Amino acid sequence: MQNQASTKPVVLSAEHASVHFGALKAVNDVSMQVRQGERHVIIGTNGAGKTTLFNLIAGDLRLTSGKIILFGEDVTNKLPRERARMGLRRTYQTSAVFNSMTVRENLYMSLLGEKSPRKWLDPFHGISRDRDMMAEVEQCAEKILLKDNLETRAINLSHGQRRQLELGQALIVEPRLILFDEPASGLSAEEREMMQRMIADLDSEKLTLVMIEHDMDIAFSVADHIIVMFEGQLIAEGSPAEIRNNSQVREIYLGGRFDDKSNS
Ligand SMILES: Nc1ncnc2c1ncn2[C@@H]1O[C@H](COP(=O)(O)OP(=O)(O)OP(=O)(O)O)[C@@H](O)[C@H]1O
Ligand SMILES: [Mg+2]
């Protein structure tokens, strides 16, 4: 959990991170720090700059100014794949699974990309022989609650199951830091609950999580630290209770939406 005396190493810092698109300051002087095992949730209105901040952290976009430090190393000028090799993974707001492949094949491909990138050229060459990898695929399928769907083609999965599979694609390579971009978007109440449970069950010793989430129930149940963005800036951060009680946040973003929620 987030606390002043935490001695866990810092796995991610943004230092005055900014990116400008012409006159638009999509991310404007954002500084943040995340320690190993913490769960940070970023909330904010549409267009606040949340996904753009993820793009800067993952290296999909270059900063106009500022720095990104990952696992103690300045990665500001490193490529996305170099950051991935250090243990960073992200999911996207829109789906990134291969429709014509089964759950097993999708997970296998993600693992292959990490462990034997050369086999990518002929990915099905050894799928049945890759016993060790298959064991990892099956363990991962269990974690994402898709063990009974291993042979189902992604196109036949429900929306919620696709999102679970995307999580699996990120988790299977055992990253140290995951960036989840709205994992619960478009899910039914039941699917959301499942997603919430899966995220709550992730290893909080080694795995650090930064998540963008619009669903306040999920955000406040997952987070030990909440970051609020507005018009490119980080306008508040703190524990869920501090954020609920922050008058600026309530005025700008929450509009009293917490009035009926408990103050846990
Ligand atoms: N590559 C780009 N070029 C120009 N403008 C961009 C680019 N990427 C993002 N923007 C703009 O930057 C702002 C922040 O976008 P971003 O996608 O980060 O918002 P967000 O907080 O993730 O919103 P949402 O909740 O809708 O996903 C928006 O005004 C968006 O139109
Ligand atoms: Mg976004």
Image (tube, helix red, strand yellow):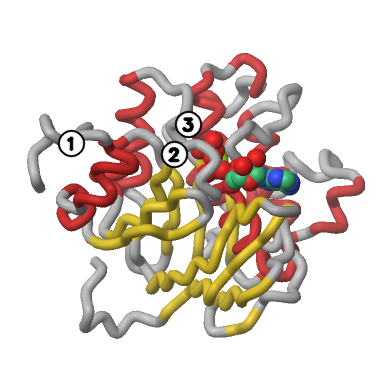
**Residue linked to disc 3:** 147
Please tell me how crowded label 2 is: few (under 14), some (14-19), or many (20+) other residues with Cα within 10 Å. some
Q: Please tell me whether mark 3 sits on a helix, a strand or a loop.
A: helix
Where 157 falls versus 215 (above or below)? above
Give the Cα distance between marks 3 and 1: 37 Å
Q: Earlier in the sequence, mark 2 or mark 3?
A: 2
Amino acid residing under circle 1: Phe
Give the Cα distance between marks 2 and 3: 36 Å
Residue situated in front as seen by the camera: 170 or 256: 256
**Residue linked to disc 1:** 258
Asked if the beta carbon under badge 2 is closer than 8 A to the nearest atom of ligand 1, the reply is yes
- Give residue 45's mark: 2
Please tell me how crowded label 3 is: few (under 14), some (14-19), or many (20+) other residues with Cα within 10 Å. some
User: Picture quarter containing residue 108?
Assistant: top right
Residue situated in front as seen by the camera: 158 or 67: 67
Which residue corresponds to the image point at 43% horizontal and 32% vertical from the top-left? 184
Give the Cα distance between marks 1 and 2: 15 Å
Q: Earlier in the sequence, mark 1 or mark 2?
A: 2
Amino acid residing under circle 3: Lys
- Whether residue 65 appears in this view of the structure is yes
Pinpoint residue 104: horizontal percent, then vertical percent: 63, 34
Which residue corresponds to the image point at 32% horizontal and 20% vertical from the top-left? 189
